[in-house]
Amino acid sequence: MANILLVANLNCDRIFNLNKPLKTGGRFHYQDGGLRLGGGGANTGIGLVWAGHQVTLVTEVGRDDVGDWLLAEASTQGINCSLIQRRPGATNEMLLMMTPDGERTIIRPERPIFELPIPPKWDTVDAFYINSSSEGAASWAKTAIEHCRVVAQLAKDERARPCHILLASLSDMQGRCTVPPWQFARSIAGDSLQYFIVTDGENGATLYSEKQQQRVAALPSRVVDTTGAGDAYAAGLINGLVKKLTIIESMQEASIWSSHAVACESSIPGKELKAYLTT
């Protein structure tokens, strides 16, 4: 078992199941899919809990009934929520527009700025994962790099992400990467970067390092809901790394986790991934 610290969001997802793909100027019918637990913290953390790890989540939620529900749901799933902060006011819902082919469009409110406190002591942490726009994440990562494995998702803006392994989707890169991928990644992650992984859905993922470029195929899967696929990939990768697999073996494990994630109707990992991890 590894101790894994996540700085990632915990969301209340409201689902709208649309009758056809989104199109500018179109009119759509929807069925209300209700509320469900989501966000990178839950989507990544729950699978790691199922894999037998101790997972602690750092984020913040509102001091309201929705915030209470999120904490209760995440705790029930086995995530350590002791470092989750409460802010005054409401916890805003994330709106997920789901189309019949399983693709989703996310509409979210502007988030209040979340400032991380003083970094923890890293000698008991095996892996640290960043998937949040919280202020202070880069400072935490800089203090963690000498003590544990640091994995980060490429931010939506140009902020620094000090880490050993930087993750991005191909869509995240569009319009942003005007230099070779490794050079781009080093400008974001700094000198400690060992690997840059760019995922491309059913087309697999590409691994970049200072000396190599290698493609790892995706596993064929029945796509029901793509929500959380990238988070599941990150979780599978982290699981492989803390189990001392090679980077390629870890990417192959990540592909398995992601394939199970897209095959279920949920934001968080579903029963197919749990069955894979517990049998």
Image (spheres, helix red, strand yellow):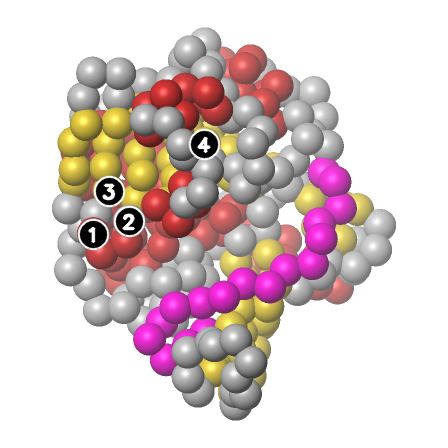
Region rendered in magenta: 98-114
Q: Considering the numbered disc 2 on the image, is that residue within a helix, a strand or a loop? A: loop
Q: Earlier in the sequence, mark 2 or mark 3?
A: 2
In this view of the protein, can residue 110 be seen by the observer? yes
Q: Which residue is mark 2?
A: 200
Tell me how far mark 2 sits from mark 4, CA to CA. Answer: 17 Å
- For badge 4, the amino acid type reads Ala
Residue under pointer 4: 152
Q: Which residue is mark 3?
A: 205
Task: Specify whether residue 278 is in view.
Answer: no
Q: CA distance from mark 2 to mark 3?
A: 6 Å
Residue pictured at 58% horizontal, 47% vertical: 9
Which residue in the structure is indicated by mark 1? Answer: 203
- Disc 2 versus disc 4: nearer the observer: 2
Q: Position of residue 230 (x, y in %)?
A: 38, 49
Is residue 113 inside the magenta stretch? yes
